[in-house]
Image (cartoon, helix red, strand yellow):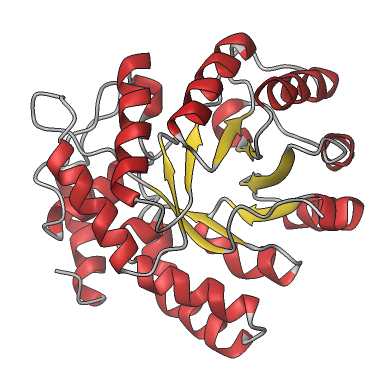
Amino acid sequence: MKQVIFTGAATALVTPFAQDGSIAWEELERLVEFQIEGGIDAIVACGTTGEAATMTTEEHTQVIRFIIEKAKGRVPVIAGTGSNDTQFCVELSQEAKELGADGLLLVTPYYNKTSQKGLIESFNYVADSVKMPCILYNVPSRTGCNIQPATYKELSKNPYIVAVKEANGDISATACTAALCGEDLTIYSGEDNQTLPIMALGGKGVISVFSNALPGTMHQLAAAMLQGDLETARKLDLEYLDLMDGFFMDVNPIPIKEALFQMGLIQTNFCRMPLTTMTEEGAAKLHALLKKHSLV
């Protein structure tokens, strides 16, 4: 049986910046502690939510190293190393392995995209080159590239390709993937509001944006599903569904950074361009949601 990197809830951690755009290292350390103390099961460094797309290669590896060092082995740390340049992805993934990452998160190629054949060849090449647990990341709304169930079936034959973060928004396709791959591919929800249905299909957890603000709540929801306690999971899901959706009322990670700023967990809501801050109207709507849930 393949290695399962984590079960439950992993946070796709934001990268806090100072107002001048530099990385706010002390705040990042506090966020790591907030997550672990809150009961999170794993942390993803340098994913979409962490704004890896606007980091230099040096910053990318610095953030991965920093989070691994501050986590101190208390939870698995998964490094986002995906790229639309497969050779660069291999090089960055090798660095993450040497830094001590527990796994890699590999997004599908974006902009230049590829075919299903290209996905199979590219992901197998990365996995075979680095030889460590890899989580594929399927988010076609951002990349324009969608992994099909039959492609997952082929990729699941690779011993190093252990899981997928599924954010295609298509529960029927996810059910097909689960049926085809069985225990050869762990499925994690890549969308907070689909955690419950994906875990009902046998998924092992979620890689979450929501848990940046509420790590304990998302941990409880996922744990309830793993324990077969559908009543508790459904209650939590419906109670916080408006907030899960609210964190996507603008382009991620703009709303979650605004939320963490309003909650006092980070000192600025700064996102690197081309991302920006929320409109005043959007920030006010988000504030109302946070207030409803007693977070501000």
What x and y, as percent, mark residue 146?
72, 33
Query: In this rendering, would 204 be left or right of 154?
Result: left
Point 50% across, 59% down: residue: 192
What x and y, as percent, mark residue 43?
43, 50
Q: Is residue 258 above or below residue 234?
A: above
What x and y, as percent, mark residue 242?
40, 68
Q: Looking at this view, is 289 or 176 the one in front? A: 176
Q: Looking at this view, is 67 or 266 the one in front? A: 67
Query: In this rendering, would 53 be left or right of 183?
Result: left
Q: Is residue 10 above or below residue 232?
A: above
Quarter of the image with the C terminus is bottom left
Quick check: can you spot residue 56? no
Quarter of the image with the N terminus is bottom right
Number of on-image labels: 0
Point 25% across, 57% down: residue: 33
What x and y, as percent, mark residue 254?
29, 41
Name which quarter of the figure residue 228 lies in. Answer: bottom right
Name which quarter of the figure residue 52 lies in. Answer: top left
Point 43% across, 59% down: residue: 245
Quick check: can you spot residue 81? yes
Point 40% across, 34% down: residue: 46
Query: In this rendering, would 256 be left or right of 174?
Result: left
Query: In this rendering, would 287 be left or right of 3?
Result: left
